Amino acid sequence: MTPEERASRSAAAMRAEDRAADWFGHEIVAVGPGSATLRMRVRDEHLNGHGICHGGVIFTLADTAFAYACNSYNRLVVAQHNTISYLSPGKPGEMLTAVAVEASRAGRSGIYDVTVTGEDGRKVALFRGASRQIDGQHFEEET
């Protein structure tokens, strides 16, 4: 099995159990070894009292991209720590894209950076997550 096939199968197994992604409308655009791209259209129920998409909804998109990237090796991985900087809000109806890339992975730990952008290319948020591998796999690999 290629690393790309492993990443794709891991993402499919995760997505099958991810009910929050259904509610938020997260779409997997691409997933590969140590990387993932997700997108989400900003809906009215994502808007806060200022009429913008900001805070937790943006965090959830970035965190989900992070999760797919760090789980792409068919190992169960959880978040240890993360930070996010909000740079601009999402606008009603806008498609937001979160691109997660592996910055470092050694042993059972990894660091991943996620950039969330709006349709016009502006940066909406910058997220950095640290991960820790736990026991288990997303699917049984043939030997």
Image (tube, rainbow, N blue to C red):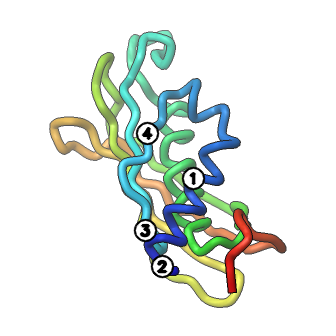
In space, the residues marked 3 and 4 are separated at their CA atoms by 15 Å
Residue type at mark 2 is Pro
- Provide the secondary structure element on which disc 2 rests: helix
Which badge, 4 or 1, is on the more N-terminal residue? 1
Based on the displayed image, in which of its 4 quarters is residue 86 positioned? Answer: top left
Q: Position of residue 67 (x, y in %)?
A: 59, 57
Q: Mark yes or no: residue 102 visible.
A: no
- Provide the secondary structure element on which disc 4 rests: strand
Single out the mark in the foreground, 2 or 4.
2
Residue that carries the numbered disc 2 in the rendered image: 3
Residue that carries the numbered disc 3 in the rendered image: 32
Looking at the image, residue 30 sits to the left or right of residue 69; the answer is left
In space, the residues marked 2 and 4 are separated at their CA atoms by 21 Å
Single out the mark in the foreground, 4 or 1.
1
Single out the mark in the foreground, 3 or 2.
2
- Provide the secondary structure element on which disc 1 rests: helix
